[in-house]
Structures are given as C-alpha cells and as structure tokens.
Image (cartoon, rainbow, N blue to C red):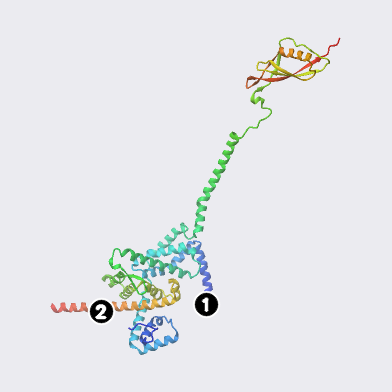
Amino acid sequence: MSDLASAIGLRAEEQGFVADLKSGSEDAFHLLIAQYSQPIYSLIARSLRDPQEAADVTQEVFVKVFRNISSFHGESSLRTWIYRIALHEASNRRRWWCRHKKQELTIDAPIENEDGETLCLADALTANGLSPFEEAAGSQLRERVTTALQTLPAAFREVVILREIEGFGYEEIAEMLQVNLGTVKSRLTRGRAALRQALTNDIATRTAQAAQTRIATNLRTVTQ
Amino acid sequence: MTPFQPDRPDATPCATAQAGFSAYLDSAMSGVEMVAIHAHLASCTACAEEFSLWRDVQRSLGELGPAAMPARLQPQLRSAIAAERTRETYLPLHRRLLHQLQETVAPAALRLAGGFAVAITIVAALGWLIAAPIAVEANDDRLANLLPAHYLYSQVPPQPIRAAQDEPILVEALINEQGRVYDYNILTGPRNQQVQLQVADNLLASVFKPASLFGVPVRGHVVLTYTGVSVRG
C-alpha cells in the first residue's frame, strides 16, 4: 500500500513538473537538463558509431523535448518519452551517416542482418581500428568492450546498452523502443551472444598477435 | 555451441540451457527454469564455462559505466533552450499563432481602426460640404436677387375712375421688361366697359420699374388699387 501511495505521489509530482515544462518554465527546463543530460548523452554516445556527434545529437534531443512538450500527455513516463526521442534521434543520425558517408567510402555499403535491419561494414572495421596510443591510454578492457559494442547491429546494441549500462527493465525498454517484450528478450539474447563472440574473437586476435610478436622477437634475437 | 531451438524436440539440453542464459542473467524466468539451468550448469563443464563468459561480458558492460559528458554541454543545452524559449516554440501551434497574432496584428488593427475612423469623419465632412443639397427656401429671393416690379410715376396726372358706386377696384397689371403695362386684369370691383377704359387709360400712362433677376429685367406683375368714385348730379 505504501508503494502504491509513493507511486501515486511520484506520478503527481511528475505531473506538476510536466505542467511547469509545458508552461515554459526556465527553472523546470534547467532541472530537466541537470537530471537527464548525462544519461541521454551517455546513451547517444554509446549508440552512435562516432561519439564526437553525441553532444550535437543530445542538443537536438533537448530542443525536440522543448518543442514537443505540449504534445506529451502522460501516456508513458516522462523519462520513457525522453529516452524514446533520444533513441529516435540516434537512429536518425546513424541512418544519415550510412546514407551520406557510403557515397564517400565504399566500405560503408549497408549489410542487412537477420532482422532485416541494415548496418555498415565500416562499423565493424573502424571498431577494431583504434590507434596504439588509444589502446595504451586508459583502461584497455573498457575500450575493448566499447569497441566490441560498436560492432553489434544497432537494434541489438540499443537493447544491450539500455539493459546493461542504463539498467532499464524489459518493459520499459519495450515501451521506449515501441516493440513487444518478446522482441526485447530476443534482441538482448542475440546482442549478448554477439558481444560475447566479438570479445572472444578480439582476445583470440590479440593472443595471436602477441604470439607473432614474441616469435619475431625471438627470431631477431637468434639471428643476432 | 548448438543454437537453441525450443520448438524442436531434438534440442539438446546444452542448447536449451544456453538459450536461457540471457534471461538467467537477469533472473527473468520462472523458478523452475532457473533451477533447471542451475542444475545443468553444475553438471556440464562446457556450459558452465560458456555461462562464465556471458557473466564476464555482463560484468564488463556494467563496469563500462556512463560515457563522460563534455563539461560545456550543459551550458550549451541551457543556451539552446533559452533561444527556443524566446521563440516560444514550447507552445502548441494554435497558441503560438494566436500569440503572434496578438503581438503583430492587434496593434496594427488598432491603428487601422483609428485611421479608418478618421477617414470616415473626413469623407463625411467633405460630403456634407460638397455633395449635400441645399434646401430651397421661400426667402431665397435675395439669394437669387429677384426684385419685383413696382410703380414709379404716371406720365399724365392720374384720373379718378368714375363708377356707379364707391368701391375699390383691385387691378393686376402685367409689366414688360421696359416697365410698361402690356395687359391687365380687374380682380375685384366693377368690370363694365366704362370702368375698363378708365383703368386702361391710367395704366397706359403709368411707368413701372420692371422686375429683375440677377439684375436682368424680366416680366412681372403689380397689383394696384383704384378708388371707384360715384358722381351723382
């Protein structure tokens, strides 16, 4: 009962907040930015193949929220609504990237995956192409995971990020992506499997490279 | 790794267990299913190693944490929102249009209404001055400078009119442009031939100032009164 009461209280509080947003309150939007800018930026940065664009897309998301707040009628929670806009904008940016850049780079020819979704070959290639300096700097593990994450098809990557990094429940993810629960579970399973495979391949590649380096070093030592 | 195919009766226990790894990681399955996978993992080393990899992947993702936001982004967002707020883009379209109407058209409408009222006043005043007809009045003789004819003198001394009895004789004399009588008419009094001859004699010798319109002599008429005198003896 107390949970229900707190849920009702939370709902009423959000309604008041939404009313402030609809009235164009500057304070309300500052609060919204303070509360959501970090998670939205993070989601977009993880979703896009070029994280440098994340700041611009985040700004587009907040401008869109501001412009469309009058059409928000509380069918979902405010958070879900904002995340839905963010995912939509990220998806638009990815499509734009593939559409425009493929004319410049032939490796960007879209490949259709099992779900009928397209992804760029360059996603996979550039993901493994981090410079040695970047490899050396910071946590190698985090970079490897980030890299592996970028190799996933967008539909799987979104679900994996929302579940594993942002910590959303299945139902909320389904609501954000406007797909059914079964699709969320399926994409999550396949995304995790693909990620596990990508990381395993990465480890195997690195092990082979390290072995080759060791052999080459030994050969040089022997010839000298 | 054998792919999971639950619809197929020949699916291996390993494939069934591995297909449930994702849900097992999130505890998003029934207790019975969880116990079944747990039991399988305890008995199958290959699946236990595979599940260990899945758990490592999950842990790695968890450790990844949120991407660090650039320090300048929040001020940039506030600035963008402030710009949008100035343009009132948060309002629904109909309210935005209404507001723009109030901001732009309403003051213009006030000026237009004022200008229209002034124009109407000016046109009405000009119309009253120019176009309105002037009512014709009975005392417009002076305006038309219409002057009636009137008696001046007689070229011979006027003779009294002898009649059968004493009574006034009222005569209407018609005067031409030269101030002479060209016809007459006895309005009241005796009308016999003797009286008419005497009246005619008097009128023929009489000189009048003719009637004039804007200074031009025109025909007119004068009403004269003679006194009829009866002579007995």
Figure check: B124 above or below A93:
above
Residue that sits furthest to the left in the current view: A224
Is A220 on the left-hand or right-hand side of A60? left
Element marked by disc 2: helix
Residue at 21% from the left image edge and 78% from the top image edge: A212
Packing grade of label 2 (10 A; few <14, some 14-19, many >=20) is: few
Location of mark 2 (residue): A207
Res. A3 mark: 1
Q: Give the percent coordinates (x, y) of residue B139.
A: 68, 27
Residue at 49% from the left image edge and 64% from the top image edge: A71
Q: Chain of mark 1?
A: A
Distance Cα–Cα, label 2 vs label 1: 52 Å
The answer to whether tags 2 and 1 share a subunit is: yes
Q: Nearer the viewer, residue B175 or A181?
A: B175
Quadrant of the snapshot with the N terminus of chain A:
bottom right
Element marked by disc 1: helix
Packing grade of label 1 (10 A; few <14, some 14-19, many >=20) is: few
**Quarter of the figure with residue A62:** bottom left
Figure check: A57 above or below A169:
above
Res. A135 mark: none
Query: Is residue A193 among the parts visible in the rendering?
Result: yes
Amino acid at the residue labelled 1:
Asp
Q: Chain of mark 2?
A: A
